[in-house]
Image (cartoon, grey):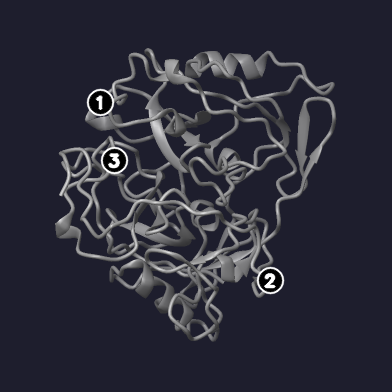
């Protein structure tokens, strides 16, 4: 198998793909969560023709098309998002700076005739994610925004330089502070960030030498949930226009069986349930909690340590799919490296015992994750 940082079985290829923006046969989803823009279908190792309903691998991200991102370049250095109502800074800042500097830079920004700029929260930042992304192919952000891969100097002095490349160093600060214990270090404050080069949410200390990119936003904060318990095992998020299975069924599944479980679910008189895409799934994370990162007044989780599958294939390695850590996002040693509320990717199927860890932070590999369906 491999070295101590990432143990990949020999039959697990590592490759990306060119991903289409929309599958012509996709069903329309009405909500207020911007679509991932992933319009290609995949099996466990390759890009495929999108299967028909009832066939294996039906129910993945491309089969359901949510609100297409609606961006307008205002020609003054700003971009409007008609779905979230937010106004974004178009520019990419090539210099990585500290958390406090980034907050101050946004607070002191005057742009587009406005001075009410701020650092975005992690739900706002993730709303920009584009899951057509694949390293060496395209960034995980729409082309209307400026973005660039840093040069080799970004890795100088970085403690993960031996396991990272410049194509992975697209980390962008959010204002969302992690409520848990960062890396098992009590007293170390950390904030979540999104990486527009590798398509993952993680956390980083807000103090010290950590420098990340930033992009400012203006407008009322977006992303808060408004849950209503329907009294029938389902919960409606009136803010985002989606209805959720109130509790997972206590079983873990690989990605293939997670798709099938939701497609075959009948609950509360409805049989149009599906596995949520990664942006829909992240929309119900409660970042004020971490054990799990969930509003347990309305939603239930049978195992507080659980991670949950999304229907979204990860473009950097199409043998993997994205999940969201509602439980703590731990390494193979049990250290909460990325934080509850982080978003990562796991092999779609296989034997977890064949892996020791994945990636530079030695992520635990589960493969069998929990499932919460949506409609």
Q: Position of residue 25 (x, y in %)?
A: 66, 75
Q: Position of residue 286 (x, y in %)?
A: 46, 47
Alpha carbons under labels 1 and 3: distance apart:
24 Å
Q: The C terminus lies in which quarter of the figure?
A: bottom right
Dividing the picture into quadrants, the one containing residue 20 is bottom right
Asked if 51 appears above or below 60 in the picture, the reply is: below
Asked if 198 appears above or below 308 in the picture, the reply is: above
Asked if 128 appears above or below 165 in the picture, the reply is: below
Q: Is residue 216 left or right of residue 357?
A: right
Q: Which residue is mark 1?
A: 186
Q: Position of residue 291 (x, y in %)?
A: 32, 47
Numbered circle sitting on residue 359: 3
Alpha carbons under labels 2 and 3: distance apart:
35 Å
Residue at x-position 85% and y-position 29%: 75
Dividing the picture into quadrants, the one containing residue 352 is bottom left
**Disc 2 packing (10 Å; few <14; some 14–19; many ≥20):** few
Point out the frontmost of discs 1 and 3.
3
N-term mark: 1 or 2? 2
Numbered circle sitting on residue 165: none
**Disc 1 packing (10 Å; few <14; some 14–19; many ≥20):** few
Q: Position of residue 94 (x, y in %)?
A: 58, 19
| 332, 25: nearer the viewer | 25
The reply to whether dot 1 and dot 3 touch (C-beta < 8 Å) is no
> How many callouts does the rendering have?
3
Q: Which residue is mark 2?
A: 24
Alpha carbons under labels 1 and 2: distance apart:
50 Å
| 289, 148: nearer the viewer | 148
Dividing the picture into quadrants, the one containing residue 57 is bottom left
| 214, 222: nearer the viewer | 214
The reply to whether dot 1 and dot 2 touch (C-beta < 8 Å) is no
N-term mark: 2 or 3? 2
């Amino acid at each position: 198998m491999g070295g101590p940082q990432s143990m990949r079985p020999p039959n697990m290829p590592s490759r990306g793909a060119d991903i289409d923006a929309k599958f012509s046969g996709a069903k329309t989803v009405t909500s207020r969560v911007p679509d991932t823009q992933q319009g290609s279908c995949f099996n466990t190792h390759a890009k495929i023709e999108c299967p028909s309903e009832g066939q294996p691998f039906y129910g993945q991200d491309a089969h359901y098309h949510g609100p297409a991102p609606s961006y307008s370049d205002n020609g003054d250095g700003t971009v409007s998002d008609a779905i979230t109502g937010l106004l974004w800074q178009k520019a990419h800042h090539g210099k990585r700076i500290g958390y406090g500097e980034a907050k101050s830079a946004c607070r002191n920004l005057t742009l587009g005739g406005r001075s009410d700029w701020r650092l975005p929260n992690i739900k706002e930042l993730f709303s920009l994610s584009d899951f057509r992304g694949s390293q060496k192919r395209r960034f995980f952000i729409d082309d209307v925004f400026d973005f660039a891969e840093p040069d080799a100097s970004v890795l100088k002095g970085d403690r993960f330089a031996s396991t990272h490349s410049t194509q992975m160093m697209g980390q962008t600060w959010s204002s969302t502070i992690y409520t848990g214990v960062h890396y098992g270090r009590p007293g170390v404050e950390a904030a979540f960030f999104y990486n527009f080069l590798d398509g993952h949410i993680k956390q980083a200390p807000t103090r010290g030498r950590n420098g990340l990119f930033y992009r400012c936003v203006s407008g009322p904060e977006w992303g808060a949930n408004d849950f209503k318990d329907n009294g029938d095992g389902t919960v409606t998020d009136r803010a985002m226009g989606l209805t959720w299975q109130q509790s997972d069924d206590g079983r873990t599944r690989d990605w293939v069986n997670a798709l099938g479980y939701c497609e075959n679910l009948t609950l509360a008189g409805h049989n149009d349930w599906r596995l949520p895409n990664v942006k829909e799934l992240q929309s119900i994370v409660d970042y004020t909690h971490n054990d799990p990162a969930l509003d347990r007044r309305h939603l239930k989780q049978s195992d507080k340590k659980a991670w949950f599958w999304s229907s979204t294939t990860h473009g950097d390695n199409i043998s993997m799919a994205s999940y969201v850590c509602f439980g703590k996002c731990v390494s193979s040693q049990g250290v909460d490296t990325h934080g509850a509320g982080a978003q990562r990717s796991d092999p779609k199927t296989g034997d977890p015992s064949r892996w020791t860890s994945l990636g530079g932070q030695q992520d635990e590999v589960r493969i069998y994750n929990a499932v919460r369906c949506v409609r």
